[in-house]
Image (spheres, coloured by chain):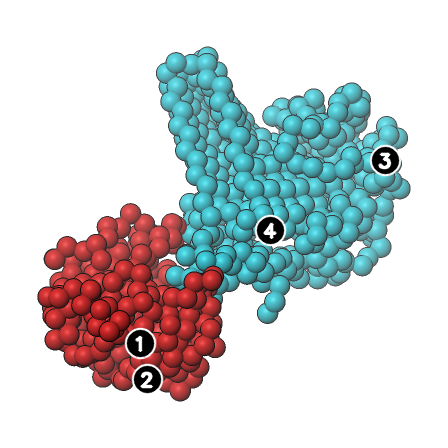
Amino acid sequence: MLSIENLHVSVGDKQILKGISLNIGHGEVHAIMGPNGSGKSTLAHVLAGRDGYTVNSGTVRYNGVDLLDLAPEERAREGVFLAFQYPVEIPGVSNIVLLKAALNSIRKHKGLDELDAMDFISLVKSKTKLVDMDEKFLYRAVNEGFSGGEKKRNEILQMAVLEPRLAILDETDSGLDIDAIKIVSDGVNALRSEDRSIVLVTHYQRLLDYIKPDFVHVLAGGRIVKSGDASLALELEDRGYGWVQQHAGA
Amino acid sequence: MSTSTQEIEKLIGQDYKQGFVTDLDADTFPPGLNEDVIAAISAKKKEPEFLLEWRLKAYRHWLTLKSPEWAFVKFPPIDYQAMSYYSAPKDKGDGPKSIEEVDPKLLETYKKLGIPLAEQERLAGVAVDAIFDSVSVATTFKEKLAEAGVIFCPISEAVQTHPELVQQYLGSVVPVSDNYFAALNSAVFTDGSFVFIPKGVRCPMELSTYFRINAANTGQFERTLIIAEESSHVSYLEGCTAPMRDENQLHAAVVELVALDNAEIKYSTVQNWYPGDENGVGGIYNFVTKRGDCRGQNSKISWTQVETGSAITWKYPSCVLTGDNSVGEFYSVALTNNHQQADTGTKMIHIGKNTRSTIISKGISAGKAQNIYRGLVKVLKGAENARNYTQCDSLLIGDKCGAHTFPYMEIRQPTAQVEHEASTSKISEDQLFYCMQRGISAEDAVCMIVNGFCKEVFKELPMEFAVEAQALLGISLEGSVG
């Protein structure tokens, strides 16, 4: 469903991604691991369509369309979802208002009617249980005054409501304690399905104890230097990133 | 990372939907201002002698004053001899008529503005006084209000029918010598609304006045007077629009409110005068003096304003808290875009004991606009236990606009408690991207964030107005493309 071919990306004069190729099938869970500065978050942002990155060459096909050709909101409406590493605070705008605007714009794109207030509320309330979130959070301003764990749970709640076809989770485990990782992972696992592909971008193996990936890729120096199954993550944990980097250099 | 400031700026291009001109025969005075012109206005209105004297006194005082320069706004000197001080649609006989007699062109104009005047069409539960240039063209629901003892009519009519009330209260809150524009208004005001709520009456419906400037090269000087007797209650709304023109036009209004013991007045404004084009050409100069006197004990006056229009806004709706335990409130949203300038805020003057005031100001600046909050909290010696809470928040959209806050405090009473909070924030690229990543267009995201920022003020508006205000912000922020 997602096919990245030889993707080169720079920020200003700096080359960040130097030829990434990756194929993701329907319902697959891929983990992208790598040391700091390897380009993991850049890849996530480029897929979501963030400003400030220059794609120098390469292609990204998503369900048969050129993903890079779409505006960020069009990608979102087509089912691409990014769970942010640092979800932004939007004072004055309540969670429920954002969720409603988001869901209705996606439904409109699909040619569906907007959900009425009652149906929407009951849908959202049912999803809050997935991430063990108090309904009161729905009426608070988006991420304002949320703890790190609450912000990440809120991202997963949005994912649950918007039901993307491709979910990219950018360092969703960073800054979380074990209990919070467990809640977030349970939420993500509940959302695994045949028609939803998931990309986990993470620095640490520990997230993968909770969300079992089908494939693991190691990104270093802007390239994928090693790919394998879930056991690759364990090996990395043992031997460190230095091992693959040497491996790549060799 | 590159900024998307330019994109944001594209989003907030103006689209002024009320900019049309109604073509009709008007009875317009030639430009110029002198005592003869004032006498002619007074004669047109068949005013009693005292009022002409009052006007002339104001005019003579005005001649001694200079245009104020302390506000943070820039404009070329106004030539007061180059504009006309009276313009009224022809065929309008003496005094207001019934709706059936109003020129259909005028009814059409108000209909286009979303204010259907014909009673069978009008919004249920809201009485409207429609002021077109210098005169009131229609007032709805007068009979029904009269049953409750409420007087709601053009001030020019009140001068005829209730001269004693006008004489007693006119200028009692804003004296003719108050300031430059108030003095000018006192000399040349042509119409406005008059409201009188008798003792113990809760006004059975919302009252509203809709101001429309149509004629070119004229100033609009309206005068509104609202009196709430003991234990009465009234909610009053005003709306304003004008055609798009390259010349600036002056709107210098005075609004006076008087609340006696236990009375409450809620005054809401949605101001959408033509703001000028994206290069700053044209637009209304909105130089307005609004003041309420909480004259009685336990009285309350609440101002709510949503200011999106005008090239320049100079306006400080204020409360004089004379009565013990009286309450003053000011809730404001001021949005400036392109080259608009707004210097707006409030004054809360605490005179009585245990008086309380609240100020919530939300300034939004986009384009090259300047948005200024200027407020005074003054606690006099006798105002024991006075309390004030002030919150001023500014939101910037793009990086060429400005927001400034000038809070003044004069506290002469040691038991007073005065709090001031201020914040400035910017709609960030991160916030926009976050919303877009959830499928929301940048335009809708800006609108959603701005509406969220203004929420505390919108909830003070009467229901129908809150919806209108949100829509108006949406239009003011709408992209010029699509």
> Mark 2 or mark 4: which is in front?
2
Q: Is mark 1 on a helix, strand or loop?
A: strand
Question: Tag on residue B81?
Answer: 3
Query: What distance separates the C-alpha of mark 2 from that of mark 4?
Result: 42 Å
Which residue of the protein is positioned furthest toward the front in this rendering?
Answer: A250
Q: What element carries label 4?
A: loop
* Viewer-proximal residue among B133 and B196: B133
Would residue B175 be found to the left or right of residue B389 on screen? right
Q: Do labels 1 and 2 share a chain?
A: yes
Colour-to-chain, cyan = B
Answer yes or no: do the residues labelled 1 and 2 have beta carbons within 8 Å? yes
State whether residue B213 is above or below residue B17: above
| Percent of width and height locating residue A191 | 21, 74
Q: What residue type is labelled 3?
A: Gln
State whether residue B336 is above or below residue A6: above
Chain letter for mark 1, please: A
Chain letter for mark 4, please: B
